[in-house]
Amino acid sequence: MKKNLLLLCLVTVCSCTTLSTEKEDKQAILAVLKQQEKDWSNNDIEGYMKGYWNSDSLKFYGSSGLTKGWQQTLDNYKKRYPTKDHFGTLTFKTTDISKIKDGSYWVMGTYHLKRNLGDANGFFMIIFKKINGEWKIVADTTG
């Protein structure tokens, strides 16, 4: 009886810890996205890019096909959004955050870009990975 009670207590503690960790992970991921909204809307592409993994292994898949690497992704953003009017105000709507494994989540949602030269809306699926204690986007599919 004591063994069963101890086992039940251990399972309960582990389950609560896992749920708490997942909740904290999701809040931290949402904080990265919220900061990206602010940086983008302030025409700060370098700030926005802090949400991405600064690595040649970063992958971005969009309307122009596959881009590999942080620097190339930044360069593409600068070409596509050359002025403040092109940036506008960015809003993300997250529809799902699911754990892939410890330290990795996928995030699905939509983006809304309000701007004077015409609004832009679409969807995204991004993969976040915890790298050196920080949540970073390691893969992004936006359309």
Image (cartoon, rainbow, N blue to C red):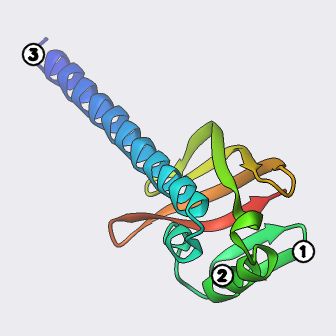
Front: mark 2 or 3: 2
Does label 3 or label 1 sit earlier along the sequence? 3
Does label 2 or label 3 sit earlier along the sequence? 3
Residue 38 location, x and y as percent?
52, 55
Does label 2 or label 1 sit earlier along the sequence? 1
Q: Quadrant of residue 48?
A: bottom right
Q: Is residue 126 left or right of residue 137?
A: right
Establish if 77 lies above or below 112: below
CA neighbours of label 3 inside 10 A, class few (<14), some (14 to 19), many (20+): few
The local secondary structure at tag 1 comes to loop
Q: Which residue is mark 1?
A: 64
The local secondary structure at tag 2 comes to helix
The local secondary structure at tag 3 comes to helix
Point out the image quarter for the C terminus. bottom right
Residue 7 location, x and y as percent?
21, 25
Residue found at x 66% / y 57%: 126
CA neighbours of label 2 inside 10 A, class few (<14), some (14 to 19), many (20+): some
Residue found at x 47% / y 56%: 35
Q: Quadrant of residue 11?
A: top left
Point out the image quarter for the N terminus. top left
Q: Which residue is mark 3?
A: 2
The answer to whether mark 2 and mark 1 are in CB contact below 8 A is no
Between 102 and 1, the one lying in front of the other is 102
Disc 3 residue type (three-letter): Lys
Front: mark 2 or 1: 2
Q: Is residue 137 left or right of residue 67?
A: left
Disc 2 residue type (three-letter): Leu
Residue found at x 32% / y 66%: 133
Residue found at x 54% / y 77%: 46
Q: Which residue is mark 2?
A: 74
Cα distance between the residues tagged 3 and 1: 62 Å
